[in-house]
Amino acid sequence: MKTQRLTMAQALVAFLKNQYVERDGRENRFFAGAWGIFGHGVVAGLGQALQQNPDFRYYLCRNEQAAVHTATAFAKARNRLAAFVCTSSIGPGATNMITGAATATINRLPVLLLPGDIFARRNVAPVLQQLESEHSQDISVNDAFRPVSRYWDRINRPDQLPLALMEAMRVLSSPAETGAVVLALPQDVQTEAWNYSAELFEKRVWHIPRRPPEGALLARVAEWIRAATKPLLIAGGGVIYSGATEALDHFTRRTGIPVAETQAGKGSLPHDHPQNLGAIGVTGTPGANIVARGADLVIAVGTRLSDFTTASKTAFQNREVRFINVNVTGMDAFKHAGLPLEADARVALVELAALLEGDRVNDEYAASIALFKQRWEEETDRLFNLRHGPPISQGEVIGAVNRAARPQDVVVCAAGSLPGDLHKLWRTHQPGGYHVEYGYSCMGYEIAGGLGVKIADPSREVYVMVGDGSYLMMSSEIVTSIQEGYKLNIILLDNHGFSSIGGLSQSIGSHGFGTDYCYRRLETGQLDGDALPVDFALNAAGLGARAIRAVTREDLERALEDARGESRTTVIVVEVDKEMRVPGYESWWDVAVAEVSEMESVQRARAQYERTREKERDLHIVSG
Ligand SMILES: Cc1ncc(C[n+]2csc(CCOP(=O)(O)OP(=O)(O)O)c2C)c(N)n1
Ligand SMILES: [Mg+2]
């Protein structure tokens, strides 16, 4: 057998360089390189291996969590057909990646994490940053990755590597199983040499399957659709990842079945598509939510059916409603006691469209959809042109950014009040044009994620919309965007705290307690003093970005134009009125209110809460 004598870390990099994926006959290299921050746990092993493999690019980030977000956003923007590796030292560098791992796994996005780990040899323990345990030597902080990863392993001997790598690739390339994959690498083992079989380093192409639907089940699905009078299709992220957007367009035009989009599914159809009712659920449009309420059939395609989509299981009130779940993941296919059509979204939609030839929704239903769409256009225009303030309204800022962006450009967001407002208002033109991480809704994803989106396709302008809270949590990757020459347009909406959780706090009777960025006042002992004087423009300029302050809508429009002509990351800081919110429409979110309290406002909120909760439906089993 031909062998090659390499350190475990060198073998790992040599392997990663040669992994390819192929779908529909199109092939590409799977890993685009490695992100990381070196420390003693990785510098002599993986760090050395990366140095001698310059064709596997190493990217230095500012924060390990951010690097995982960048990698995750990259994979999302590439429809999971490419990914990054993220590495860290042992200890804090590793645990910094845990939040990123959870974000990737919850969003079903591939990322390979290679945290350094404590010595397998053990004789020098405890090493710097080692978590000691009284009951085992076989524990390190990297065990904390186990629940947030889809595959987890620790390479305690160099010869364990090949098997682990095959398992890692199996999971990363699987549409059904993908998420964060963690290979914990003890720092001594990384540097140990082994005679690896040369076969390990040959080019390997992983086929991405398009699972076809089972024939009998597909016929039943078609039967259910034909029998329905008020069907609604929910498009989730799976539609986009599977490249099923054209198939969806064809299916809905042919059948007239309206489509509602989840956060991950937004952009499945252009906003002005005749069957696109827009966002569904807690952050949905009136049309999508009213249609959902009365629907007798819900065809959920590529969606996890999270509480934001189902309005905490209050969205579907028709007593006869049934679910068909088209999904590659069994867990999702079986939700809501639905008919589980475990299949690739594109194949399923193409085959269904053929089976439903000639079958269309009735004229009355079609007319109601057109009317909902027209009214929603009017409502969006109203919110885009409020002419409130200054400080101007968040809806008006979204309108200005939406108008400034070209059809192929991308908006990126993750947490705060922006995702809900964007879900409702953003007019998406092309798949991938709307990139909002709302599985984990992780504050700090925005700028780091925007960088990943930009790397995935530098021809698209990236508009990162970020609240002051998220910006303060993680703006570090502005520096990385400048280092790498990837330009971001960052629009920072400053409302001096949390509009989102502040509003939620008011709705549960707590008056926004603890959600404003204000000085603590001696008189009250509370954070209810003047607003803190954070100068975001100065901060962004200090990190190397071009910074522009905007007060009025006209300022903002000019700034967006300036930013377009810029070659480096530009941060536009605009103050928005926290209380001038985009309303909710025909929906509800279950956030449990205190059952007993001395506060009357809380008691009132609780009474209201108990009434609304009665609408929750656990399962949708229809007898017969
Ligand atoms: C890491 C993390 N911590 C806490 C939360 C809970 N949370 C959701 S939105 C939010 C406030 C975000 O503030 P900002 O970015 O200013 O947006 P705004 O609510 O003002 O629109 C918080 C604390 C979260 N989603 N992520
Ligand atoms: Mg804010």
Image (tube, rainbow, N blue to C red):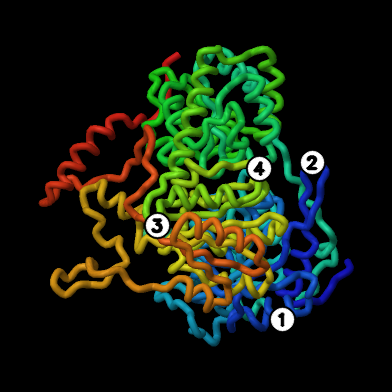
Q: Disc 3 versus disc 1: distance between alpha carbons?
A: 48 Å
Q: Position of residue 38 (x, y in %)?
A: 61, 79
> What residue is drawn where x is 78% and y is 75%?
54
What residue is pinned by disc 1?
A: 48
What kind of element bears circle 2? loop
What kind of element bears circle 3? loop
Number of residues whose C-alpha sits closer than 10 Å to that of mark 1, classed few (under 14), some (14–19) or many (20 or more)? some
Q: Nearer the viewer, mark 1 or mark 4?
A: 4
- Which quadrant of the figure contains the C terminus? top left
Question: What's the residue type where badge 1 is placed?
Answer: Gln
Q: Nearer the viewer, mark 3 or mark 1?
A: 3
Q: Nearer the viewer, mark 2 or mark 1?
A: 2
Question: What's the residue type where badge 3 is placed?
Answer: Val
Sequence-wise first label, 2 or 1: 2
> What residue is drawn where x is 58% and y is 39%?
329
Which of the numbered marks, if any, corresponds to residue 430? 4
What residue is pinned by disc 3?
A: 576
Q: Are marks 1 and 4 in contact (CB under 8 Å)?
A: no
